[in-house]
Amino acid sequence: MQMKAMSHDLDVLIPHYRDPAGLRSSLDSITQQTWGGRIRVVVVDDGSPEESFAEAEVECEHFRALGRHDLVLLRNDRNLGRPRTRNRLIDAIQSPYVAWLDAGDIWYPEKLTRQFEHLANLCLNGRDPNRIWVTCAYDWSQADKTRTLTQDTRGDQLRSLLIGSNLRAYLWTLLGTAEAFRIAGRFDERLPRLQDLDYFINFVRAGGQISSPRGREGLCCYFKSHLGRNAAEIHACYKLILAKNAPALKRYPPSLASELHYKAARLASQFAKSNDRPYAATLFLLRGALGSPRHTARMVVGLARRRLKGAPAKPASLQQDAQS
């Protein structure tokens, strides 16, 4: 497919639930985009209470009143959960290009411009745009501290996504053609958490490639919180994703599967600890140690060496945040 001028329509897909103030921030960031194409925003409210939904309606009407872009507001008749809401957003796609944005997160003004330019350059070099997702570096804001994280798309992208240290699965970083998103299929409605990771894996396993513009500056910002996440739910979702991809994991050394099962337990432990459940946090770590003794031993040895050298412990992987 040959790319034409960058004036094609773009659908921006936004799930919303009980966060009208966050929705306002997200919509404001869309109005500030320097990209000159026509944008159609689709917001699906996931059964918010009447008062919250009424406030979201006000924010959507304000966005429409600016007259720059179109906006469609849909509502689930009850709370159906993030994956079903995202599938409804997929069903609402009408434009040739698609980007995602979660209510409460924001894009910086150059995001769409930079990503469309990058996609155009890839096409000029013979790449198929219907097999590409364009991600980007992003700012990670947590506890009044912000740091920029880049996306390393080199090498084995399936392995990188599963490990989650250098390539992370966040929908709100993405831009692509509608067709490129179709090859990933639909969101697994068995996964109340970690749908982003599962969806990215589906895309890569279907032959898709993730690419990122050059540069280390963030093009969007995610506002992070561990609070309110169900640690057991997160652990179950991670384990389901690993089970779904067990055939693909068999082509890697057994040490990778061991590492990933340990990460599932460690991630759940982090959320349990953040929710003031130290006993549950300890149980998850013990489960990880018993299930992946070889990887646990390597982690303990590495931690001991760093402490002997006076170096701080490595921060936990940021990938499987489980907000999605």
Image (cartoon, helix red, strand yellow):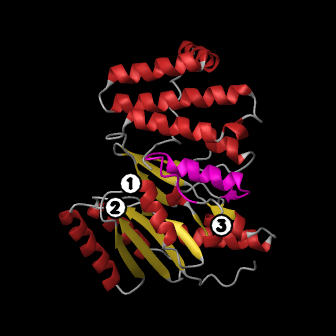
Query: Considering only order in the chain, which callout, 3 or 1, is on the residue closer to the N terminus?
Result: 1
Q: Give the amino acid type for the residue marked by disc 1 in the picture.
A: Gly
Amino acid under disc 2: Asp
Can you identify the residue that label 2 sits on? 46
- State the residue in front, 290 or 295: 290
Classify 10 Å Cα crowding around label 2: few (below 14), some (14-19), many (20 and above).
Answer: many
Q: Where is residue 216 in the image (x, y as percent from the top left)?
A: 59, 54
The residue indicated by pointer 3 is: 180
Question: Which residue is outermost to the left?
Answer: 51
Q: Is residue 148 left or right of residue 156?
A: left
Answer with the quarter of the image where residue 259 lies.
Answer: top right
Along the horizontal axis of the image, is 313 left or right of 145? Answer: right
* Label 1, label 2: how far apart the Cα atoms are: 7 Å
**Does any portion of residue 109 appear in the rendered image?**
no
Q: Position of residue 221 (x, y in %)?
A: 45, 56
Decide if residue 34 is on the left or right side of residue 46: right
